[in-house]
Amino acid sequence: MSTNTANIGARVAELRERLNMSRLDLQDVSGIPAYSLGLIETGERSASTLELSLIAGALGVSVSCLRRSDTATVSPLADYLSYALALEEFLDQLAVPSPGDQERAAPAHMRG
């Protein structure tokens, strides 16, 4: 087990616990089996890039937050806002309309 793998696992566990989530809760939100989450949290196996992205999204933080080693400076809300802004920019690049845009684009008779 590498130090980085152990640090990421500890970070995942810390953030999950701060949010009062069980591994089953995180499984439901991330789609990653609780057993795999346990192995990742204990550093017994590393998480793939996709898994890190899914876990970060489920915890409301950026992937870079999971990779940091300074646990004292974790700010889930700040990281979530950064993540949300980055996601919005990414979706804009893909030309994916936001929910508000879809409502405005709908014909008047279809609006709720």
Image (cartoon, rainbow, N blue to C red):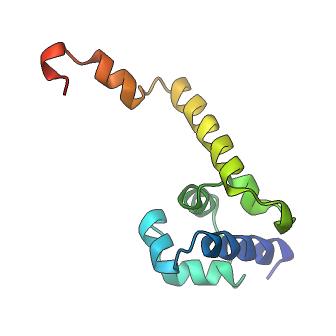
Q: Residue at x 73, y 62 (%)?
A: 66
Question: Which corner quadrant of the image does residue 36 belong to?
Answer: bottom right
**Relative side of 34 to 53, left or right:** left
Quadrant holding the N terminus = bottom right
**Relative side of 98 to 15, left or right:** left
Quadrant holding the C terminus = top left
Q: Position of residue 19 (x, y in %)?
A: 59, 69
Which residue of the protein is positioned furthest toward the left in this rendering?
109
Question: Which corner quadrant of the image does residue 68 belong to?
Answer: bottom right
**Viewer-closest of 45 and 95:** 95
Q: Is residue 56 above or below residue 79?
A: below
Number of labelled discs? 0
Q: Position of residue 8 (x, y in %)?
A: 74, 70
**Viewer-closest of 10 and 48:** 10
Q: Residue at x 41, y 69 (%)?
A: 28
**Relative side of 17 to 72, left or right:** left
**Relative side of 52 to 30, left or right:** right
Q: Position of residue 63 (x, y in %)?
A: 69, 55
Q: Is residue 98 above or below residue 72?
A: above
